[in-house]
Amino acid sequence: MAHRFYNLAEWWHLLSLDAPTVAALWAWFFLSAMHLHLPILPPLFLALGTWLLYVADRILDGLRQRQADLRERHHFHARHRTAFLWASALIVVLLAWFVLTRMRPEALRDDSWIGVFALLYLFAVHRRAHASWLPKELAVAILFAAATAVPAWSRLGASNGGKEKLAPAVIFFALLCWINCVSIEKWEAGNPHSTTRWASLHLRSIVTMIALFSLAAAVLAPSRGLMEVYLAALLSSGLLIALDARRTHFSPLHLRIAADAALLTPLAFFPFAR
């Protein structure tokens, strides 16, 4: 049973399904926290868009980086590049249909900005092997958190204070995504940006601070839904600290998988969703 679980987790990671799962889950979580209607299509198509970006990033990494710097996910995408490109073409068609026929104007506006920044990110990061002025981990965290928040953000009115209540929760999630990327860079011993290198040296202290602030935010949260968001951030922080403490007990592949699985803590609140 354990071997089968590990195999499923490896496929979840190698097929680039990890980040889309996290994105769709937190998009649902933000919608639930703000007591909004829980549609199926926006989180689903957010997951598809996230998958496209991650597949493009991993294929480009495989083309640009030295073989010694590549991980199993890069080799897997290189071996199955044709299949990934065909699947990406189909998903682009589905996303185009969704944008033209189903997307709310507010969400289209917000997602358009995020899409532009995502393309700029891909260009900046992959134009040269090392972009000394751009911390990749920070760029990924901001883009990922912003895109995940759009389904809820676009449905909140500007006059009822909903966006002001949601904004701190999105910032906490962005911090969590950033420290998740920093953790992966530390564990994979890559060649990160200087700011990421500094953060990796102080990883446990930073994650502990995020956990403490998450606890304080949960206590002061204006609603039960937002309290659950901050508690999920607290749980994820604790899991990242535990992973860092026991990193020598995992293979590099399983450590990378566990880092993304640490962001699945909203699942703990499914039984309490309203």
Image: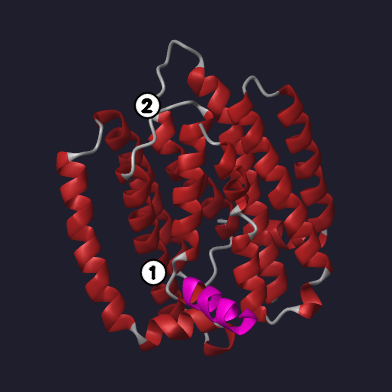
Name the residue at 52% across, 89% down. 67
In magenta segment, residue 6: yes
Name the secondary structure under disc 2. Answer: loop
Residue 149 location (% of width, % of height): 46, 38
Q: Where is residue 131 in the image (x, y as percent from the top left)?
A: 53, 64
Mark 2 vs 1, N-terminal side: 1
Sort mark 2 into few (<14), some (14-19) or many (20+) by Cα contacts within 10 Å. some
Disc 2 to disc 1, C-alpha distance: 29 Å
In the rendered view, how is the structure colored? secondary structure
The kind of residue tagged 1 is Val
Q: Can residue 219 be seen in this view?
A: yes
For the residue carrying disc 1, how many other residues have a C-alpha within 10 Å: few (<14), some (14-19), or many (20+)? many
Residue 191 can be seen in this image: no
Q: Residue at the location (37% across, 68% down)? A: 56
Front tag of 2 and 1: 2
Place of residue 255 in the rendered image (x, y in percent of width and height, measured from the top left): 67, 73
Please, what is the three-letter code of the amino acid marked with disc 2?
Answer: Arg
Q: What element carries label 1?
A: helix
Would residue 234 be found to the left or right of residue 49 on screen?
A: right
Which of the 4 quarters of the picture holds residue 111? top left
> Residue at 50% across / 19% down in the picture?
162
Q: Nearer the viewer, residue 83 or 200?
A: 83
Q: Nearer the viewer, residue 161 or 188?
A: 161
Q: Is the magenta stretch mostly helix, strand or loop?
A: helix
Percent position of residue 75, x then y? 46, 86
Q: Give the range drawn in magenta.
A: 1-12
Rendered image quadrant of residue 54 = bottom left
What residue does disc 2 label? 155
Q: Report the residue marked by disc 1.
A: 55
